Amino acid sequence: MKPLDWNLLRAFHATATLGSLSAAARRLALTQPTLSRQILALEADLDVALFERIGRKLFLTSTGSVLLEHTKLMGEAAEAVSLSAVGDVQALGGRVSISATDTYSAYVLPDILARIRLEAPQLTVMVLASNDLSDLHRREADIAIRHVAPDRDGLLGQRLPDTEAHFYASNEWVRQNGIPADGTALARSGLIGMDDIDQFAAYMSAIGVPMAASDFRLLSNSGIAVWQMVQNGLGIAAMLREVADRTPEVTRLPLDLPPIVVPVWLVTHRGLASSPRIRLVQKILSEELAHTIQPRSSAL
């Protein structure tokens, strides 16, 4: 087999890492048709398909994933040489996408993004606010903040300190309705539900709040929507402590119920773990999230 052209490998590496021809073309200062021809030429040289083209999106094939593993060291070496020549982490460029729940994206990430912008002003950060798990194998995100452990080969997870959720109501709601005495009273107090409602109702019952799915009168698949309902005095909801701490005019209800323990994971794909920009963003996320969710005194 003839030696592979580094320019073709570089084109593949940039496209696979950034997830689109347009982004890779901007990174390499090429036109998109030129980059596309280089990808096709590499596929022809190797006689394999490296990407699946679904609509306007590109997804790595299994062969493409293997090739990315082999090219990432070359790509990172080239990026490291570039950084060494500049001699300043602030010159670190490119794009990093972070997926997180909508509440984390709205309430917790902004402070962390401020630090990322300060330390690496040339980075572009894309926040994907979704309560569904992003598919890191398909490069839907580079780094995911999740509340479940990674469960697929090729994913790397960093376990952060667990956080907790408690029950909250607006100060005005408490003034009008008082504080429920126990879990049974809480179940009759207008608890706001989250999808999957059957699973949520089962969990509530398990911790001492006897509710069936049919008992909920307000529901949403959006944590932000639920939290806005709470702030508007429409009822009570469970919320992560670090979100509630950033929200004025809400009260944590002093209920004799076990805290809802929520794990926190930072997850990325093994193929991106050695990227300088991924390492920098993950380091900042790790430090800031650990500081944010460190256990605090249980005193109200």
Image (tube, rainbow, N blue to C red):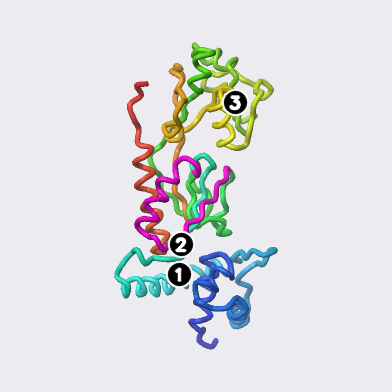
Q: Name the secondary structure under disc 3.
A: loop
Choose the circle earlier in sequence order: 2 or 3: 3
* Residue 192, numbered label: 3
Judge by depth and name the residue closer to the eye, 242 or 154: 242
* Residue 102, numbered label: none
Q: Residues within 10 Å of mark 2 (few under 14, many from 20)?
A: many
Kind of residue at disc 3:
Ile
* Residue 72, numbered label: 1
Q: Position of residue 282 (x, y in %)?
A: 40, 54
Q: From the image, which quarter does the N terminus lie in?
A: bottom right
Choose the circle earlier in sequence order: 3 or 1: 1
The residue at the far bottom in this view is 2
Kind of residue at disc 2:
Leu
Q: From the image, which quarter does the C terminus lie in?
A: top left
Kind of residue at disc 1:
Lys
Kindly indicate whether the residue at mark 3 contacts the one at mark 2 (C-beta within 8 angstroms).
Answer: no
Q: Nearer the viewer, mark 2 or mark 3?
A: 3
Q: Position of residue 284 (x, y in %)?
A: 37, 51
Q: Residue at x 50, y 12 (%)?
A: 178
Q: Residues within 10 Å of mark 1 (few under 14, many from 20)?
A: many
Q: Residue at x 44, y 46 (%)?
A: 110
- Is residue 113 covered in magenta? yes
Residues drawn in magenta: 105-131
Choose the circle earlier in sequence order: 1 or 2: 1
